[in-house]
Image (cartoon, rainbow, N blue to C red):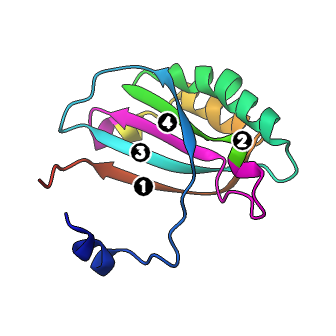
């Protein structure tokens, strides 16, 4: 895809970017037909960013890794330098989880999933957005 194509697809005035450190919570092989959930994670208002990142990685991450249907789980934590800017980052990071298919994604709402959602109130704002996608190579 060329830059000229992007100008027809992207509203650059509304585009948000963050610099992140990728942390593999649950490694696993992915295939071309696998389904991925991408969640844009917002830090709980008033929570110090170091506490947010520590909790997400050390508490929430291991809880989510227990969900059997998740094949791979990566947390991309916003770098600390982003918090030093005049405008704070829009997101504390991005969570990516891979599933064999959409049915497996839906089935992941098991007791382990309930435990991760219960832990969410301790560190995230529920205002985050997410995308469910299947990767397609276009060139």
First in sequence: mark 1 vs mark 2: 2
Residue neighbourhood size for the residue with mark 1, other residues' Cα within 10 Å, grouped as few (<14), some (14–19), many (≥20): few
**Which region shows up in magenta?**
82-104
Give the Cα distance between marks 4 and 3.
14 Å
First in sequence: mark 3 vs mark 1: 3
Give the Cα distance between marks 2 and 4.
32 Å
First in sequence: mark 4 vs mark 3: 3
User: Which residue is under mark 2?
Assistant: 80
Q: Is residue 87 above or below residue 36?
A: below
User: Which residue is under mark 4?
Assistant: 109
Give the Cα distance between marks 4 and 1.
17 Å
On the rendered image, what quadrant is the N terminus found in?
A: bottom left
Label 4 vs label 3, nearer the camera: 3
User: Which residue is under mark 3?
Assistant: 37
User: Which residue is under mark 1?
Assistant: 131
Label 4: state its secondary structure: loop
Q: Residue at x 75, y 57 (%)?
A: 85
Give the Cα distance between marks 2 and 3.
25 Å
First in sequence: mark 2 vs mark 4: 2
Residue neighbourhood size for the residue with mark 2, other residues' Cα within 10 Å, grouped as few (<14), some (14–19), many (≥20): some
């Amino acid at each position: 895809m060329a830059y000229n194509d992007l100008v027809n697809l992207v509203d650059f005035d509304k585009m948000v970017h963050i610099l992140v450190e990728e942390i593999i919570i649950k490694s696993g092989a992915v295939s071309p037909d696998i389904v991925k959930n991408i969640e844009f994670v917002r830090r709980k208002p008033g929570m110090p960013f170091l506490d947010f990142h520590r909790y997400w990685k050390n508490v929430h991450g291991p809880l989510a890794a227990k969900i059997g249907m998740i094949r791979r789980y990566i947390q991309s934590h916003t770098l600390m330098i982003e918090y030093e800017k005049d405008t704070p980052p829009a997101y504390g990071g991005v969570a990516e989880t891979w599933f064999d298919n959409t049915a497996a994604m839906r089935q992941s709402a098991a007791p382990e999933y309930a435990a991760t959602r219960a832990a969410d109130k301790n560190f995230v704002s529920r205002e985050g957005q997410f995308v469910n996608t299947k990767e397609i190579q276009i060139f």
